[in-house]
Amino acid sequence: SQIVMRGPDLVALQEVSLLRIQPQDDSLFGGTVQATEPNLDFLALLLEALNRQGGHYEVVSEIQEVDVELPFITGPTTFADIRLTDRDVILARTDVPPGHLRTFNRQSGNFSRNLTLPIGVTILRGWCSIDVQVRGRQFRFINSHLEDRFAEPVPNIQLIQADELSHGPADTTLPVILAGDFN
């Protein structure tokens, strides 16, 4: 993998999906029991793949974003619920010499303004950050996923989220590295 080959100290990931399934659908009929059985966890798969290839990384900060469950057809008269949870994640290397990389002050948050679809689903977005010390120098590393920019009459939620980011976690005396999917 490119991560193991290049060996970055920090990695910012967006849309790190977790899919869960509930074999007996209840959402189609107004039920409220959420699916909890993991079916596909991209974060676990990535960490396992990195480890197999000799990479040593751990999650140092993350934020859960959109979390939505919908019914899907599994047969002519049967349904199941599938739940999609997206996360933004910061990984840090764990195999660096002592004192080379220190992370602290883990923070995260969801934006106060998000896109709500006509079907009533809100596309939650957010950010996660970690303060980092490398060879005696400190900085804040922020990972975010901003909403797409849509045409009028949809408000410019992307600009509102960017402003919230700059007046929130990026408002620090530390140097800032901002990574993410800014659409």
Image (cartoon, rainbow, N blue to C red):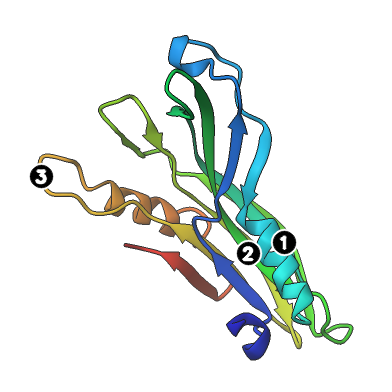
Q: Which residue is mark 3?
A: 152
Q: Label 1 to label 3, Cα distance in Å?
A: 38 Å
SS at mark 3? loop
Res. 70 image quadrant: top left
Nearer-N-terminus badge (2/1): 1
Nearer-N-terminus badge (1/3): 1
Q: Does the rendering let one see residue 171?
A: no
Locate residue 82 relative to residue 116 in the image: left or right.
right
Q: Which residue is mark 2?
A: 90
SS at mark 1? strand
Residue 31 picture location, percent across and down: 53, 11
Compared to residue 51, the image places residue 17 above or below, namely above
Which residue type carries mark 3?
A: Glu
Compared to residue 74, the image places residue 90 above or below, namely below
Camera-side residue of 75 and 44 = 75
Q: Quadrant of the C terminus?
A: bottom left
Locate residue 150 relative to residue 66 in the image: left or right.
left
Nearer-N-terminus badge (2/3): 2
Q: Which residue is mark 1?
A: 60
Compared to residue 32, the image places residue 101 above or below, namely below
Which residue type carries mark 1?
A: Val
Q: Are marks 1 and 3 in contact (CB under 8 Å)?
A: no
